Amino acid sequence: MRLSERAINVQASPIRKLMPFANETKKKGIHIYHLNIGQPDIETPKEMLNVYNNYDSKVLAYGPSQGLDIYRNNLVNYYNKHGIKLNSNDIIVTTAGSEAIVFALLTACNSGDEVIVPEPFYTNYNGFATMTGVKIVPLTTYAEDGFALPTDEKIKALISSKTKAIMLCNPGNPTGAVYPKEDIQRIAKIAIENDLFVISDEVYREFIYDGLSHTSILDIKKMEQLAIMVDSISKRYSACGARIGCLVSRNKEFIASAIKFAQARLCPPTIDQLAANAAIDIEEEYFKKIISEYEKRRNLVFEELQKIEDVICIKPKGAFYIIAKLPIDDSEHFAKWMLEEFSYENETVMFAPAEGFYATPGLGKNEIRIAYILNENDLKKAMKIFRKGLKEYKNRR
């Protein structure tokens, strides 16, 4: 019995596929600093945890397919604070941002349609595309340019009769790039001229540094029928396990169709919505402290990377990731070697090889993604071990 083509072709996560090597390393008693996955060590707000601790309903019942009214209404207030005017009927609560992306692709595209995505991109876009029968057309960006968007001509050259959307992640995972308003306007203009949806993954909207600001696709005029936004609480409130996100569009027909997919999975998790709802009114001071903390971590990692000869790395402006091009040939081999053969004072480091964040074969093979999600003290130790490991690896090779 042969499995489905989608099951055979779906990409294994480059973030998680090295976990068996990590598990074997831990069995040897070696401590691993995990810089491979975007799981922050910031504490989840007590406002959320109190909901879980105090939930006392006798029945945990189904909720509405589009999400609890109280939460969607409060999301309207949240986005209003960010200058985005919505009503609750523009919002579908989803099981994390992942489901929102799947719903967006299922609603916007037919099987065989194409979506243009700047690469490197969040690796699970590959999996979502395979699940929905969509083809990702990569728009290559480069470490040397800080992963800036290419010219309009290069973007337009990728548009074909099968193109249905352009998908962005802003701020970017895995690059940390933040697209300025001018770039979002450029993308919107191309979308309007070619009648394309723009699916904008904005889950890192709060995490922007150096005095920059975030521009949502929903901020752009004349995009009411074409703009689709994906959001999530996972990183905003350091609540990755809550699995609450949302799909947002002012296009009534799009939302009405997407709700059918939401009905097929019945409803998003009730208690997690209530917890997310409790976090909406968290004081701005909460985010100021977190952003300041991440800026310090970013600076530390960037400065440590700059000590490596021949490394190519531009300081990221957002999210909490950094991609570095290293003076090696195969970053996956290096990552496995760090887990299997190298330790310093009984500790080692795990990071994500970047090849899996590209759709173009061969790209990213000498690049890695580091998630700076550990406290400063641990990051200092981790980067010291990383530099020692890289030096020894190069000498042995």
Image (cartoon, rainbow, N blue to C red):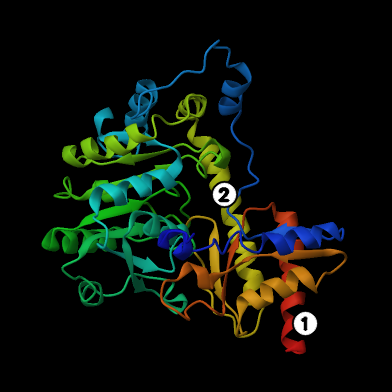
Residue 107, disc: none
Q: Residue furthest front?
A: 1
Percent position (x, y) of residue 140? Answer: 37, 75
What residue appears at the point 39 percent right and 25 percent down from the top-left corner? 71
Q: Callout 2: few (<14), some (14-19), or many (20+) C-alpha neighbours within 10 Å? A: few
* Quadrant of residue 47 within the rendered picture: top right
Between residue 239 and residue 23, name the one nearer to us. 23
Between residue 362 and residue 153, name the one nearer to us. 362
**Depicted 206 relative to depicted 35: above or below:** above
Q: Left or right of 340: which side holds 372?
A: left
Q: In this orientation, does residue 317 appear?
A: no
What residue appears at the point 43 percent right and 64 percent down from the top-left corner? 121
Q: Nearer the viewer, mark 2 or mark 1?
A: 1
What residue appears at the point 39 percent right and 49 percent down from the top-left corner? 202
Q: Which residue is mark 1?
A: 392
Q: Which residue is mark 2?
A: 292
Percent position (x, y) of residue 369? Answer: 57, 66
Q: Left or right of 149: which side holds 348?
A: right
Between residue 357 and residue 1, name the one nearer to us. 1
* Quadrant of residue 286 within the rendered picture: top right
Percent position (x, y) of residue 245? Answer: 42, 39
